[in-house]
């Protein structure tokens, strides 16, 4: 939704897990190994998908703004429910009928877009904020995955189900990951909103996994 390059901010840092971390991959089909492994890169090292980090950050910011501004979808939308988007698909069709000029249509879309979607994007607005997958720092990683046991619980009896033992994999606490993000063409208030969200990670307020 922008045709002029105005600014670019690169953000780098390290994210340390303060508890055991688990972001699940698909159930393993290997004859030997964990039933439920964590997601890994091609080298077998753990990683945090950029989409997982971005989703957790966006959700926290939406919660903050909803507490301040209320549930008006034009201010704070719910990307998981189309009826609660700032601009629904049917509304977008109507806007295209009314505004045949692309510049006018763009201006109208931006005016009706909720605050968080200005930065994180929506079906109609390009995201200004991109996060690379967070990879583990190689100097701190030597394959120290942890295996933990679990058991399925029968809903009716609330007791352990027979033959339903399983194990799952976690990344130990204190594991560092490399964080890299890029923000392009952001306004001052959008950068301020992003800093509020990143500060929540600094103060260990946003869970992952």
Image: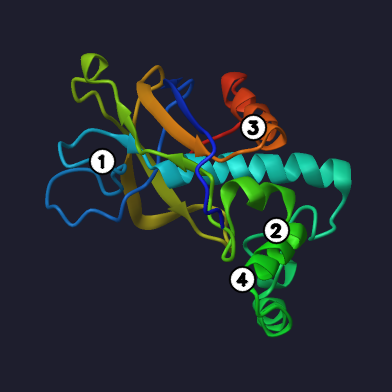
Label 4 crowd bin: few (<14), some (14–19), many (20+), radius 10 Å:
few
In three-dimensional space, the C-alpha distance between marks 2 and 1, rounded to whole angstroms, equals 38 Å
Direction from residue 23 to residue 119 in the image, left or right: right
Instruction: For marks 3 and 2, give the one nearer the viewer.
Output: 2
Q: What element carries label 2?
A: helix
Q: Which of 125 and 15 is in front in this view?
A: 125
Q: Are marks 2 and 1 in contact (CB under 8 Å)?
A: no
At x 22%, y 20%, the residue is 138
> Which numbered disc flags the more N-terminal residue, 2 or 1?
1
> Which numbered disc flags the more N-terminal residue, 3 or 2?
2
Q: Are marks 1 and 4 in contact (CB under 8 Å)?
A: no
Q: Do the residues labelled 3 and 2 touch (CB within 8 Å)?
A: no
Q: State the image quarter where residue 150 is shown.
A: top left
In three-dimensional space, the C-alpha distance between marks 1 and 4, rounded to whole angstroms, equals 43 Å
Q: Name the residue under label 3.
A: 191
Q: Name the residue under label 1.
A: 40
At x 53%, y 56%, the residue is 126
In three-dimensional space, the C-alpha distance between marks 3 and 1, rounded to whole angstroms, equals 31 Å
Q: Mark 4 points at which residue?
A: 102
- Residue 82 image point, x, y percent: 66, 71
- Residue 11 image point, x, y percent: 47, 25
Quadrant that contains the N terminus: bottom right
In three-dimensional space, the C-alpha distance between marks 3 and 4, rounded to whole angstroms, equals 27 Å
In three-dimensional space, the C-alpha distance between marks 4 and 2, rounded to whole angstroms, equals 12 Å
Q: Name the residue under label 2.
A: 110
Instruction: For marks 2 and 1, give the one nearer the viewer.
Output: 2
In three-dimensional space, the C-alpha distance between marks 3 and 2, rounded to whole angstroms, equals 17 Å
């Amino acid at each position: 939704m922008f045709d002029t390059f105005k600014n670019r901010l690169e953000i780098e840092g390290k994210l340390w897990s303060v508890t055991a971390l688990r972001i699940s991959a698909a159930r393993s089909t290997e004859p030997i190994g964990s039933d439920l492994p964590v997601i890994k890169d091609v080298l077998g090292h753990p990683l945090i998908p950029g989409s997982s980090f971005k989703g957790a950050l966006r959700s926290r910011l939406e919660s903050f703004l909803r507490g301040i501004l209320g549930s008006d979808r034009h201010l704070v939308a719910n990307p998981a429910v189309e009826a609660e988007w700032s601009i629904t698909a049917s509304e977008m069709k109507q806007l295209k009928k009314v505004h045949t000029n692309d510049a006018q249509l763009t201006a109208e879309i931006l005016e009706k877009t909720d605050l968080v979607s200005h930065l994180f994007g929506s079906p109609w607005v390009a995201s200004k904020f991109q996060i690379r997958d967070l990879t583990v720092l190689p100097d701190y990683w030597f394959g120290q995955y942890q295996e933990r046991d679990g058991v399925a619980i029968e809903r009716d009896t609330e007791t352990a189900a027979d033959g339903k033992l399983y194990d799952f994999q976690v990344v130990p606490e204190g594991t560092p990951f490399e964080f890299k993000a890029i923000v392009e063409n952001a306004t001052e208030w959008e950068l301020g909103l992003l800093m509020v969200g990143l500060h929540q990670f600094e103060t260990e307020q946003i869970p992952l996994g």
